[in-house]
Amino acid sequence: MRRILALCLALLTSPAMAAPAHYTLQPEASTVGFQTAFGTDTITGQMPITSADLTLDFANVAASKINVVLNAAGADASFPFAAQAMKGPKVLDTADFPSLTFQSTAVRKTAEGAEVTGNLTMRGITRPLTMQAVIWRQKGQAEGDLSKLTIRLTGTLRRSDYAATGWSDMVGDEVKLDILARISRTE
């Protein structure tokens, strides 16, 4: 972990990355994971990423931008019946809102990596969301090679903020996010 943190700090201050760099997502190697309480149990799941547009500026972290579209209709959960209920009209309502979007509004360097704040739109409702981010080179990349990176974003949202309140007597309001995005620099 100490090695990852050192790399995060090095990446965020690297003179080799003095200009903003555009990255594309490696969708087959990236996941948007989530979990929430289900009575005394936990529901976990994943949601496919439709598209991601990332511009990272390691010299001026605040200039970095992240725009992501998720395929809510393709979401899956650890309990099959929960996946169907989650996509239904009482939670995500994927018939009317098949996608979720996140657009960053601020990126701030922290001691552990970065804090990414943006607007999450779910069910046609947009609310601010802040996530913690760490970044490192992908396995097999040489030191200083920033062409392939991995970003891990973690955060929490309340589904009631987005009117996704179905089955609130059985399913928790707090949803924990754990996003692992593998990205490649475009020239």
Image (cartoon, rainbow, N blue to C red):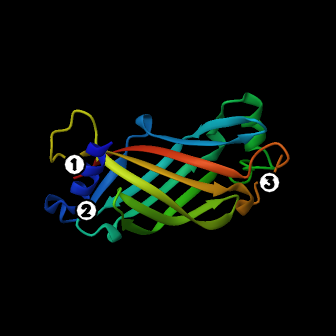
Residue 98 seen in render: no
Residues under numbered marks 3 and 2 in contact, where contact means CB atoms less than 8 Å apart = no
Q: Which residue is mark 1?
A: 146
Using a 10 Å C-alpha cutoff, classify the residue at mark 2 as few (fewer than 14 neighbours), some (14 to 19) or many (20 or more). many
Q: Provide residue 99's location: percent of width, then percent of height.
A: 62, 52
Q: CA distance from mark 1 to mark 2?
A: 11 Å
Q: Amino acid at mark 1?
A: Leu
SS at mark 1 in the image: loop
Marking on residue 58: 2
Q: Earlier in the sequence, mark 3 or mark 2?
A: 2
Marking on residue 165: 3
Using a 10 Å C-alpha cutoff, classify the residue at mark 3 as few (fewer than 14 neighbours), some (14 to 19) or many (20 or more). some
Q: Amino acid at mark 2?
A: Phe
Residue 67 lies left or right of residue 92; in this view the side is: left
SS at mark 3 in the image: loop
Residues under numbered marks 1 and 2 in contact, where contact means CB atoms less than 8 Å apart = yes
Residue 103 lies left or right of residue 84; in this view the side is: left
Residue 50 lies left or right of residue 109; in this view the side is: right
Q: Residue shown at 30%/50% (left/top)? A: 5
Residue closest to the eye, 125 or 109: 109
SS at mark 2 in the image: loop
Residue 105 lies left or right of residue 163; in this view the side is: left
Q: CA distance from mark 3 to mark 1?
A: 42 Å
Residue 137 seen in render: yes
Q: Provide residue 9's location: percent of width, then percent of height.
A: 26, 57
